[in-house]
Amino acid sequence: MAAGEHTDSRHAVVVGGASGIGAATAHVLAQAGWRVTIADLTEAVPPDAGSYGAGTQAAGADVVGAHDSRIVDVTDEASVEALFADTAPDLIVTTAGVSTLGLVTDHDTAEFRRVLDVCLTGAFLVFKHGGRVVRDGGAMVAIASLNARQPGRGMAAYCAAKAGLVSLAQVAALELGERGIRVNTISPGFLVTPLTEPVLQIPGLTEGYAENSLTDHLGTAEDVARAVMFLAESPWMTGEDLVIDGGAQHRSYPDVLGLATKAFS
């Protein structure tokens, strides 16, 4: 399939699609008529055409009801390899991520490795095995973070993993471009998702993130999902990191660790 071509049989695999950005992405793709496979640590309910409006229903009976879900652990190479066996998707999106807090000099090494295993090595495994089977002319999108370019105190593991992910995707774009496959990342600013909900319990943090934005709009998972769709449909865009953060990159990142220490010490 040529990049940007519309057919009713387009297939997307969304890794980390059970919640947050991944779930929103699965919904937006289903609305646009894509057949969606949700892959996550736990089996998720596949997108239901009836829940996402006429866009999905208009795609045809061969798409409606054809969504499915798979269990995958991105830290387990055999699990990732099995996910992509016997499939040839047009689009692969990887959103899996975890985070932790700790000063570099105090950071637990096992926790540091855990974050890198999910956020960076996990994405590498998706690129490795997904890149072998994604259709020529298709696309791969990985969710990075504003923290790939804007550091935050106590966020060494997450910042390092997401910065590495941006570079990893650019290398993949170089290597897979020969097949017409486009590889990009999206770096969102702060969003309310299952990953970030715990830190919102820190007094003053929600206000800090709101003040960091240059607009009144607070970002949502749906904002990121629409950016995924944009990249999936953009035949001349590859090797890029699309930042959608309300302009937060132009200001300093909130002191998450400092606020947490003050609140809970």
Image (cartoon, rainbow, N blue to C red):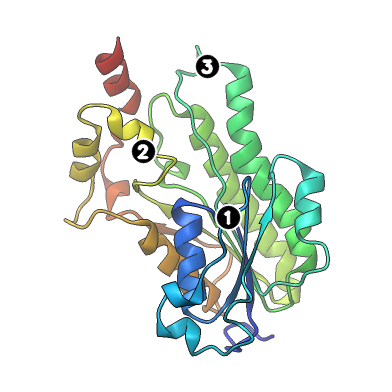
Number of the front mark, 1 or 3? 1
**Mark number for residue 44?**
1
Residue 1 sits above or below residue 122 on the image: below
Label 2: which residue?
A: 197
- C-alpha separation, residue under disc 1 versus residue under disc 3: 33 Å
| 256 is higher (above) or lower (below) than 138 | above
Secondary structure category for the residue under label 2: helix
In the rendered structure, which amino acid carries the disc numbered 3? His
Whether residues under marks 3 and 2 lie with C-beta atoms below 8 angstroms apart, the answer is no
* Label 1 neighbour load within 10 Å: few <14, some 14-19, many 20+: some
Residue 235: where, in percent of width, then height? 57, 80
Task: Identify which amino acid the numbered label 2 is placed on.
Answer: Glu
Q: Nearer the viewer, residue 61 or 255?
A: 61
The numbered dot on residue 107 is 3
Local secondary structure at mark 1: loop
Q: Residue at x 64, y 50 (%)?
A: 168
